[in-house]
Image: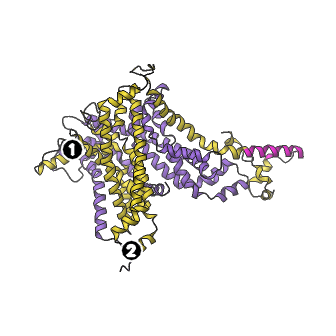
Amino acid sequence: MTHHAEPPAGDVATATDPAGGPSSPGGRDRRTRAAGSSTTPAAETRRLIRRQRRSRWDLKLSPYLYISPFFILFGLLGLYPLLYTGYLAFFDWNRAYYVRGDFVGLDNFRFVLTDPVFIKSLVNTFSIFLMSSVPQVILAVSIAALLDRNLRAKTFWRMSVLLPFVVAPTAAVLIFGSLFADQYGLINQFLESIGLQPILWHVDRWWSHLAISGMVNWRWTGYNTLIFLAAMQAVPRELYESAAIDGAGRVRQFLSVTLPMIRPTMIFVIITSTIGGLQIFTEPRLFDNTPNREGGPDHQYMTSTLYIYVKGIEDQFYGRASAAAWVLFLIIVGIAILNFAITRLLTRRSA
Amino acid sequence: MRTRTRFSDRPGFLVYGLLGAFVIGSALPLYWSFVIGSHTKGEADNFPPPILPGGHFLENAQRVLDTVDFWQAMLNSIIVSTVCAVSVVFFSTLAGYAFAKLKFRGSNALMAFVVLTMAVPVQLAMVPLFILMRDYGLLDTLAAVALPTLVTAFGVFFMRQYLLDAVPDELIEAARVDGCTQIRTFWTVALPAARPAAAILFLFTFMQVWTDYMWPLVALQKTETLQIALDRLALTGQGQTTDYALVLAGTAMATIPLLLLFVLAGRQLVAGIMQGAVKG
């Protein structure tokens, strides 16, 4: 970071510029004076050349200097661990704390892919992901369409839909846990009071997924609503006017003007919610009130990220956890690409 | 034929009704936590449940303070979130400025790399990160919690998008003609222009680190952030019947700081999400 320490006098490259004569304003005169004017012409030329060279380096190197903190830190704490995951996955660590075991090739992958618990966690991950992303996108687009109308108190409404976003997932799952408790939970007490059977939210696999997606939806719908709203506001209003002149009603306008116009945003939201949705961890971990907390007594709602945590951090099977992480990573990338393709196809057709 | 355009007509009662229902639905769980958190354990278990806040919040809060080291946890959360937010804002502005305004070889490829890494689920690397922290003796320290979020690809992307329009090229040229070094130009031209986006990025990063549960769970053992303290509170609250008055008082206490932030800076948060969306 030597550049920072240097006095800002270096830039005489600009002094060769016709605009940069001695008459140029303010700071530079001061600096020239500070550099001392008592030198011989030869020394002066040498100094100028030196400065010029320094300024050329300043121009060339500065950009790299500015981006380097990001790349260095990301490399050390993002990229390197990710690659290291690949390395870990090919060795047998078998709880040997500091000692690397034998190279075992694809054994860890074989173990993970034939582990019924991992397969179950994958199914759970998908189920929870679908239950949370599909209704969420539909609801968010609908609410955004309402917010896109010429409302009074716009800011109030926009802020209101974002409220759940400031509640940490940890707090959200504890709040919802009290609503979804099997015994004495608000929802079950209500069901019983109207003569229905209580639902075993923590036991029945699909009901537990529904409860968990409920919390996820609660926290994220407003956030995505605002993203959709931003996209809708960018749609030129003339399009609606001409659609109205053509006799299109509101619903028709929404389907044939709004939806095609927000396609890029739709793709963006779907891809980001795929990446996030397939890594759900906090909710299934804390929804469990059995001591193990491995996503239910029978892993009914254990997600794959939770599997990686349990295997890798709690049980210290580094190899298996890393193999699981890679499998999940490849699935996430695959789904994201698939989503991209499908969304493109669908929205293009409707356009 | 319609004579009124889309602009002039105010939406009807139905639109406000639907929006109102959605907003009330969104706010109810939060309200519920304050209601239950302010009643005694006995009252909280009643059915039908209390629907108005009770007068026992301070009592429950005291029980929370007796159960977990709440203030220490909050202090830890404040420290970690602030450090990460400051670091992300500073380095992202620096890198974002370089990508948006300076010409250098490889800038397009490097920016593409940044965008690509936004899609990479870094959390999946928790095992090697854990090993890394352990090998450097950082487990159970706040440093371990903060390290992985000192920079984010999203931050660089966000600042770049903002600075593309916020700083006119002529201004940078003018600064250079005036003899400014690159870093001085950054300091005097780019940094002031970046302020609104920097505030938003600060908010987001702060919230992201504050609400994170998984990484602190991996990196910490005895030390606690707020989310870990909540987790422990929930565990102790579980008896034969869960002590929801205690647990929900805790969640309310943990949510209040962000709620305050929301009241103070919700506008910027909304603007930030909408801005990121249009440009993203």
User: Which quadrant of the figure has residue A298?
Assistant: top left
According to the colouring, which chain is purple?
Answer: B
Looking at the image, which is closer to me, B25 or B96? B96
Q: Amino acid at mark 1?
A: Thr
Asked if residue A16 lies left or right of residue A8, the reply is right
Q: Position of residue A61 (x, y in %)?
A: 68, 43
Looking at the image, which is closer to me, A261 or A39? A261
Quadrant in which the C terminus of chain A appears: bottom left
The local crowd at label 1, few if under 14, some if 14 to 19, many if 20 or more residues have their Cα within 10 Å, is some
What residue is shown at x 41% (from left), y 26% (from top)? Answer: A106
Kindly state the secondary structure of the residue where label 2 is placed.
Answer: helix
Task: Write down the region rendered in magenta.
Answer: A35-56
Which residue is label 2 attached to?
A244
Asked if residue A179 lies left or right of residue B151, the reply is left
Which residue is label 1 attached to?
B40
Q: Position of residue A278 (x, y in %)?
A: 37, 42
Q: Can you name the residue that lies furthest to the left here?
A: A195
Look at the image and say whether residue A44 sits in the magenta stretch.
yes
Q: Chain of mark 1?
A: B
Dominant secondary structure (helix, strand or loop) of the stretch shown in magenta = helix
Q: Colour of chain A?
A: yellow
